[in-house]
Amino acid sequence: MDCRLHYDLLEAYLDGELRLERTLDVEAHLVSCGVCSAEVQSWKDIQATMQGSAFYHRAPAHLESKLRNLLPQNRGERRPWFQRSVWAAGGAAFAIAVLLVFFIVTGPAAPSPSQELVESHIRSLMADHLMDVVSTDQHTVKPWFDGKLDFAPPVPDFAAEGYPLAGGRLDYLENRKVAVLIYHRALHIVNVYVWPAADNGTSAIGTKTIHGYNVVAWRKNGFEFRAVSDLNTAELRDLAGLFKP
């Protein structure tokens, strides 16, 4: 073996990087070559010296304690990989179970009464079911509700004030049947929902806007009233004020 090639091979030999057949070639050469054999032995002596206890000293107790405090607790206590996997999977399953219980218990948020009114108003315009009885005559609309409800809703006509009666229909809100009176104001349609109140008191007129539709609420003469329309709130409040005691 040409000694000019030995140094790279010898370094790989000492580091254990050679394949078996190449290792045997190097060891055979070391037997016949005193120079390479001495070189290898010199490197081995250096390795042995560097690994000897003379170069290692135990850290002072105070330094060892300080270094240990900088390390995460129980860092050296490593569970087998399958135990870590089981704990990780268990933690994920527990988190999913908590989320499922939360959603099952809480469920999707129910729409508010005002949102339900607006949705009913929109459905009546989209489904071509605005009126069950079409008439501008209150004496036709009012009797139509007889026998269909457990109460007799008031059915006034405000044509003279600019809010003509157009008809009526039945609807279902908050788990009960309600009467709906339909009025016109220019090109606007107003749905007025009516159902019995808990008492005969009178409330102030309240307003709110949901999805671009205005909702006006009031209580009078033992009935709850809700007017829903894209008509402005000022005119809806005027309509509410026309319902006399």
Image (cartoon, helix red, strand yellow):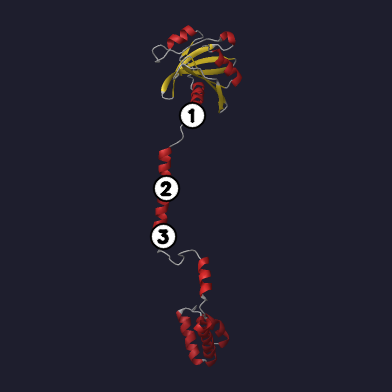
Check disc 3 and give the amino acid type.
Answer: Arg
Tag of residue 112: 1
Between 106 and 142, which is closer to the camera in this rendering? Answer: 106
Q: Is residue 163 left or right of residue 175?
A: right
Tag shown at residue 96: 2
Q: Horizontal and vertical percent for residue 92?
A: 42, 52
Answer few, some or many: residues within 10 Å of disc 3's Cα (few below 14, many 20 plus, some between 14 and 19).
Answer: few
Per the image, label 2 sits on a secondary structure element best described as helix
Q: Secondary structure at mark 3?
A: helix
Amino acid at circle 1: Ser
**Residue 191 makes an appearance in the image:** yes
Q: Report which quarter residue 160 is drawn in.
A: top right
Q: CA distance from mark 3 to mark 1?
A: 47 Å
Residue type at numbered disc 2 = Ile
Q: Are marks 1 and 2 in contact (CB under 8 Å)?
A: no
Q: Which residue is mark 3?
A: 84
Residue drawn at 56 percent across, 23 percent down: 207
Mark positioned earlier in the residue sequence (1 or 2)? 2
Spatial CA span between label 3 and label 2: 18 Å
Q: Residue 52 at what x, y percent from top left?
A: 50, 83
Q: What kind of element bears circle 1?
A: loop
Residue 214 visible (yes or no): no
Q: Residues within 10 Å of mark 2 (few under 14, many from 20)?
A: few
- Comparing 100 with 184, the one in front is 100
Percent coordinates x, y for residue 156 in the rendering: 51, 10
